[in-house]
Each structure stands twice: as structure tokens, then as C-alpha cells.
Image: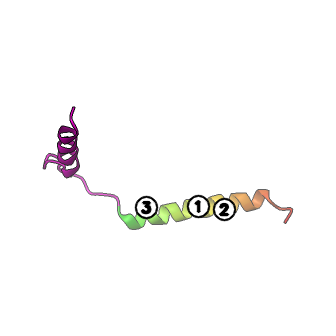
Amino acid sequence: MSLHTTTAQLVTLASGGGEHVDEHASISPYVTGIGAFLGLMLLLWITTRFNRDR
């Protein structure tokens, strides 16, 4: 494969080619952010319970 052919294929792949159709609703970024925050707070709480010597 030449550099030109590889580049052309990568550009076609990156553009999506109009083939992907999103038929379902996406997860809300707020739900994802709140879930990540709560997960990190839980891990922080667990860590502080095991580190009682301070």
C-alpha cells in the first residue's frame, strides 16, 4: 500500500461514509457525569475508611 492509498482510506473511514445511523437514544452526559462523580466519591469514602491512622 502506498501512503496516498492509506491516507485516502483513513479519510474515508474517519468521515463515516454516511453508513452509520444512530437509531437509539444516547445516554445523557449529565447521567454519565453524575454516575462517575458518585463512583469516585464512593471510592474516596472507602479509601478514607481504610486509612484511619491519619
Q: Residue furthest right?
A: 53
Q: How many marks?
A: 3
At 21% from the left edge and 35% from the top edge, which residue is drawn? Answer: 2
Instruction: Name the N-terminal-most of marks 3 and 2.
Output: 3
Tell me which amino acid carries mark 3. Thr
Question: Residue at position x 14%, y 47% from top?
Answer: 17
For the C terminus, give its image quadrant.
bottom right
Percent x, y of residue 35: 49, 61
Q: The disc labelled 1 sits on which kind of residue? A: Leu
Of the two numbered discs 3 and 1 on the same chain, state the one appearing first in sequence.
3
Q: Within 10 angstroms of label 2, few (less than 14), some, or many (20 or more) residues?
A: few
**Viewed as shown, does residue 37 lie left or right of 48?**
left
For residue 16: magenta? yes
The N terminus lies in which quarter of the figure?
top left
Q: Which residue is mark 2?
A: 44
Q: Label 2 sits on what residue type?
A: Leu
Residue 53 x/y as whole percent: 86, 62
In the picture provided, is 51 more to the left or to the right than 19?
right
User: How far across and down, in percent of the image, does residue 50 sit?
Assistant: 78, 56
Element at badge 2? helix
Q: Which mark is residue 40?
A: 1
Q: Identify residue for label 3.
A: 32
Q: Are marks 2 and 1 in contact (CB under 8 Å)?
A: yes
Image: magenta residue range? 1-27
